[in-house]
Image (tube, rainbow, N blue to C red):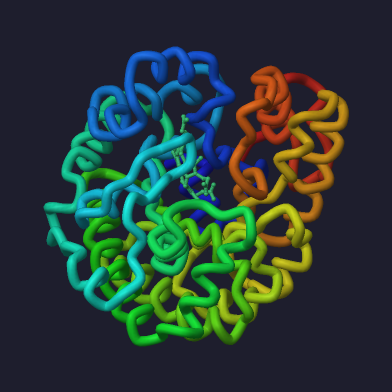
Amino acid sequence: MSIFLDAVQGKDTRRAPIWIMRQAGRYLPEYNAVKERYGFWEMCRNPEVAAEITMMPIRRFPLDAAILFSDIMTPLAEMGVEIEFAPGPVVARPVRTVADVERLRVPGPDGTAPFVAAAVRMIRERCPVPLVGFAGAPLTLAAYLVDSGGSADGHHGLRAWLYDRPAAAHLLLDKLTRVTVDYLRMQITAGAQTVQLFDSWAGVHASDVYDEFGLPYARRVLAGLEDLAVPRVYFALGSHHLLGPIAGLPAEVVGVDWRTPLSSARAALPGRTLQGNLDPAVLGTRPEAVSARARDVLRQGLGGAHVFNLGHGIRPDTPVGHVQRLIETVHAFDRHTEGDREDDEKVPR
Ligand code: 1CP
């Protein structure tokens, strides 16, 4: 067993396991070197390359889990959507009408990006720590499809579209839900030991809009994995106002962003493993500040199972030495005594 799997299954472990959202990305020089040779889709679609990028942070740091190298947009390309990366996703033709939605393909259980299943199998052969698979939540995927990519204005376009075209929205969200269930089931069957559903844009919505367009589809995705008995993580950025509905989702683990203290998330989500939530901005400061703030987060996470992570993805300008420092700080913190071990021996489970 691993300490990460213990914690995601609800065990209040003696030290917190740690992995980092976007740990296989642009802050790593070895990732940037591979990027010189391949386009983003090539890296995702070549199982050997995707597996090796997944392994990069694992080879460099004593992390407690790996995350598959891919993107939340991967299954959308399989649905027939034309997407480029610059570096964020750019969708060639936005999906806005019922006819646009009807044109999208549902590739079926084994047809949604089979190269991802191949990468998962390769990673499992070479990775000493558990592998986290992932997908985007339907409402977040819809944000990129409706607005042709990311957004600097809180996806104003998607928000207007949901009020204006609710029937088309439900049709799109239903289709995205079916594809996402197939896609995550394929990852789990290939060997993913935990899965995370990224709802990165959930927080821009009014809570009743989320209740109608976000929650039911996230629930269907998570419930659609129930029989596979793999721990499920639900992460919604900026979701302080949504913690009530989120508490009802079938997920063993809830990811929390840096704005909500873990102690208040703990009160809203009794019995759940919490994952998070160091502000990624801290990693751009001094090493002493990284350790001090990480210990604040560790203390706020006491009182139940905790998987340490950032409150959102690591920034490309993060010094790699600060990542090492962060992992050492988390590994040294004894959750029983609320202090560091004197020697450099690791804290037992
Ligand atoms: O560790 C890892 O890097 C794992 C692989 C991974 C994951 C989990 C990538 C690689 N992307 C993601 C998830 C992802 N992609 C999310 C959810 C997490 C989050 O909120 O950050 C989102 C919203 C995306 C969409 C996306 N893809 C963005 C965000 C910006 C925007 O416009 O909204 C970006 C920059 C990408 C491209 C991308 N995906 C991954 C990488 C390493 C990159 C950068 C591409 C490059 O190298 O230039």
The residue shown at (47%, 79%) is 162
Q: Dividing the image into 4 quarters, which one contains the N terminus?
A: top left
Judge left or right: residue 87 versus residue 241: left
Q: Dividing the image into 4 quarters, which one contains the C terminus?
A: top right
Is 152 drawn above or below residue 319 in the view shown?
below
Nearer to the camera, 275 or 97: 97
Nearer to the camera, 2 or 151: 151
The residue shown at (47%, 25%) is 58
> Whole-percent x and y of residue 52?
34, 22
The residue shown at (21%, 45%) is 190
> Whole-percent x and y of residue 175?
26, 71
Residue 298 in view of the camera: yes
The residue shown at (64%, 74%) is 243
Nearer to the camera, 317 or 332: 317
Image quadrant where residue 166 sits: bottom left
Image quadrant where residue 328 sits: top right
Give the tally of numbered discs. 0
Is 85 drawn above or below residue 199 in the view shown?
above
Residue 305 in view of the camera: no
> Whole-percent x and y of residue 218?
42, 71
> Whole-percent x and y of residue 271?
60, 70
